[in-house]
Amino acid sequence: MLTPIAYGLAVVLSLFIVFIGTRFLTAPRAAAAGYGVPAAEGTGDPAYLTIKGVRDLTYGLVGLALIAFTSADAVAWFLLVVALAPLGDTVIVLRHGGTRATAFGIHFATAVILPLNAALLIAL
């Protein structure tokens, strides 16, 4: 019973990160607003938006590849390391004028869910 839940959550999280990365590459201004730090007017911070999109897309695809081709322990360690990204995102949103609700409700919550998912995978 634990196996489908642990892997299912890992797949959903990875697919969600793929979606976020793709959104930053295809609809960058909307994605930046959802992230919690809207893009600057005029230039729209194209480098920031592209970097964020590539980073998230890559993390999501690596997560899916690990799920498909490696062990639960490898996926768990990946999730533990990747949890640093939303933790950093929390700080970025707070330092750059984003709301506490976005910082903690989206980014910090993700930083908590990833290690919990890792713990489920290690328990397998």
Image: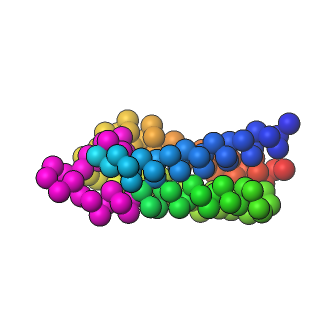
At a point 15% along the width and 49% down the height, the residue shown is 41
Residue 103 percent coordinates (x, y): 39, 43
Magenta region includes residue 31: yes
Say whether residue 104 is visible.
yes
> How many numbered discs?
0
Residue 80 percent coordinates (x, y): 63, 58
At a point 53% along the width and 50% down the height, the residue shown is 18
At a point 45% along the width and 40% down the height, the residue shown is 106
Magenta region includes residue 43: yes
Span of residues in magenta? 30-52
Q: Nearer the viewer, residue 95 or 30?
A: 30
**Residue sticking out furthest to the left:** 42
Residue 21 percent coordinates (x, y): 46, 52
2 in relation to 53, above or below: above
Say whether residue 80 is visible.
no
Name the image quarter holding the N terminus.
Answer: top right
